[in-house]
Image (cartoon, coloured by chain):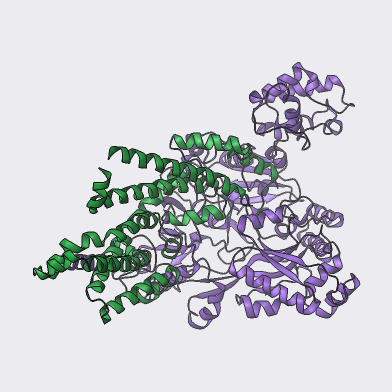
Chain colours: A purple, B green
Amino acid sequence: MRIFTKIILATSILVSLSGCKGEPPIAKANKEKILIVGNSNEPKGLDPHLVSGVLEGNILRAIFEGLCVDHPSKDGAALPGAAERWEANDDFTIWTFHLRKDGKWSDGTPLTAEDFVFSYHRLLHPDLAAKYSELLYFLKNADHYNKNDRCHILFSNDAAFDWSLLKTANLKGDPNAKADTSKSFSELNSSEIKSWIAAKGLDSLGKNALEAILADASLFDWPSNIPSATRTAVLKRLHEHAETDLFDLAQVGVQAVDDYTLRFTLRAPTPFLPEITKHYTWFPTPKHCILKYGKIADRFTPWTDPGNLVSNGPFMLTKWVFNHHIDISKNPNYWDADTVKLNGIRYLPTSNTYTETRMFLDGQMHITDSLAPEMVPYAEKNLKQFHRQEPYVGVRFIRLNITKKPLNDPRVRHALSLAVDRKLIIENLLQGGQIPASAITPPNGDYQPPAIATFDPVKARKLLAEAGFPDGKGFPELKILTTDRETALAEAEAYLSMWKEHLGINVRIEQREWSSYLKAQNDLAYDIAPSGWIGDYLDPTTFLEMWSTGNGNNCTGFSNVAFEQALKDAALISDPKARLLKLAEAEKTVLEAMPVIPFYWYTKNYLIQPNVKNWHPLLLSNHPYKFVDLAPAP
Amino acid sequence: MLRIIFKRTFQSIAVVFFLFTFTFFAIRAIPGDPLASDKNYPEHVKEKLTSYYGLDKPLPVQYAIYLGRVVTGDLGPSTSKEGRSVNEIISQSFPVSLVVGLAGITFAICLGIPMGIIASLKKNSWVDYFAMTLAMVGICIPSFVLGPLLQIGIAMKTDMINVAGWGTPADIFLPAITLGIGTAAYLARLTRGGMLEILSQDYIRTARAKGVPIFKLVIKHTLRGALLPAVTFLGPAFAGIITGSFIVETLFQVPGMGQHFVTAVTSKDYGLLQGLVIFYGFLMAGANLLVDFALVFLNPRLRDSNS
């Protein structure tokens, strides 16, 4: 048995040796002024142009800096960032940002307007396939360049071509043409060429294909009223510019007037543009660094690796251990380095919220990402000194597939909405302090959403009877699609029981795992689906534009002319107050049709050590780290 | 002997190939979309990404391309952890899982085997009942219960051990215990069973009658034969334990490989899942091969029949 005694002895020595740390990690971090934060998961990357999440944004906001930065405590206020001042013309369509002359990248290179132009060029580059490119569509012509509308770029502004006629040609490809578009032109045999060209459309053709059409005109079907001289001219010009970058010709509304002056030409009046420039898609990226590791539109080159990444924010990347932690440290070249109190921040990928809470209570971090809803009542009672509950710009809603019977009847949709007792579910089931939603857009700034979604079972029954289902008789059994998470299931069960109780209808639960749940909504292969939305910036449009016809996030089949007209009208109003009123009118149109049932507005529950200073409630939860400080622990 | 090695190696490769082909088509048969995202992005971007990852090509073509890449050792890109290759993910996360797994299996062996030996020597006494009840509890208690109990009961009560994380050497104890406890329990039961069988043999009675001390009797005469079932079990258990566990890794925030098995399926990351399956397949086949050799070494009867 001696061998076992030895092992036990060795183990206990090891334990006592490694246990010499004695003090919790935050005690050490307090001394070193390092903030340790829970960041919910491993970031998918740190290239501001390729990521699309909130957790990546938390890190990007610390290492990069946009034209304007968030105020530590005031929502919707923009402080000078990379720009020291800015002005707009009377209708807010042309904005001029004056960059500060002492702005530098973390390697000491001066930050110039060209870095911004390069950054927007890259984000919009059709070959980069950036998921968040739509956030730059505020810039004039950005959409055409990003969608690679080559004909539009080359001919719409040329008087020699009749654009209204030309745009009737097959530009974007015919979805009915049967061809394997995954093949490249050189892989095709002669019988496939014609259908392949039809499937691709003029905008996507390369040099080879255009040459083939120029040699054999029968390969492309033009609308008959386009004269043949025009056809050849079009093909020749397309060929001349084929496979080249059309950024300059596209006239995207961003221009470096000089090294320190940046001018934006917008597609519509945007009085809230400074608010938008705080989003990471609008950050500058270092041209010299990105081009060192690859071409402009190369995805995932090593430029974002620690040691390579050059940034312009208050902090810079020092260490990134995959799935473990990310360390950033104070950037000595930052123009406002004196304001920055912290020496660094450590981000932990805390995917398990229960573990996160235990780590916090064991002194392993300063701020958690979130508190599990069922822990909130406990925290309110026992963790008062740490617990914070704050409104967050997000909405939980229930999508309805309005292309399906009987959900195509607005009365049925309203009946379903009126039968949901939001307050009851929140207080008894969710318990996270959520706010019952009477509309889609959470109230923010001066925007007051219309109050239409309420609880009124009597009216609900009446509407259902009017729709032909008195007391739910004859109502078909619908399915409610949820994810496989337990909280989602509990929530769905709450709806079911309310619809059963107040309307007398039966709804069945269908659970799917995450990605097939998403796919079913995209394909409109569902009846009812609870889902949610988090705003990208503080303006109602981030919650409203998604309900336009054909928007990728609509997923309800909703299409309404009056709504879209109201959105368009609002976009042309330059008076901020009048604009918000118009948007409220647009939202009212959606709510009257009720393709989605608003349920609640989000709150954020988390734990924070009392010695973290300047961490105030913010609707977007985009805390500017440069103002955060750590007081010596008591 | 050499022929057996060749035969077994060839069999292992065939198994891995079958596994690979099956996974390739099975994961694609599940509804879902590797490029799905909770916020939908524009259609033209989706098209670009689909062709970037080669997902627009017909299935047989995708299979051929992928197989060609795998043969050269390139497991391709991951779609859910964009910008990282599957090779990179495995090479960064496997060493961590290996360390935790080795610690876990060491813990299991050091606890399970002595427990089984003691229980068998004190058969039907309170020691035996106690050890076997403990083993039963060890088998039955799931790691998602044990883990939090250890976190609350040990980590939060002491300054020495963190609740979760992977920074200090002490961080290995709780994950290793959580990971190894089930294996320890199995080992205890298997060892006890093996020991009891051997202890009833005539040659043991002879040895006892000749006055061989109990310690020598166990180590020299009994253990070699008694450990056979435990060793057979240890091979696959070892491969399973060193590839990590989703629950243990997310619970203790260990940057290991086990969590990727689960996230790869839920996010429909075809490349990552296939890469992991191939890797796991090779490990499993390798571990089984080693067990076969170890058994030949431990059991002279097998050696005789082979030669």
Side of B66 where A272 appears, left or right: right
Asked where in the image residue B139 lies, by quadrant, the reply is bottom left
Q: Residue furthest top?
A: A215
Q: Along the line of sight, which residue is nearer the eye, A423 or B306?
A: B306
Q: Residue furthest left?
A: B210
Q: Is residue A551 above or below residue A11?
A: above
Q: Residue furthest front?
A: B202
Q: Along the line of sight, which residue is nearer the eye, A488 or A164?
A: A488
Q: Along the line of sight, which residue is nearer the eye, A361 or A67?
A: A361
Name which residue lies at 54% across and 40% down. Answer: A299
Q: Is residue B272 above or below residue A536?
A: above
Q: Along the line of sight, which residue is nearer the eye, B285 or A40?
A: B285
x and y percentages locating residue A539 in the rendered image: 70, 59
Name which residue lies at 46% across and 48% down. Answer: B276
x and y percentages locating residue A81 in the rendered image: 56, 53
Check the picture and name the quadrant holding the C terminus of chain A: bottom left
x and y percentages locating residue A341 in the rendered image: 43, 61
Q: Residue furthest bottom?
A: A381
x and y percentages locating residue B17 in the rendered image: 47, 41
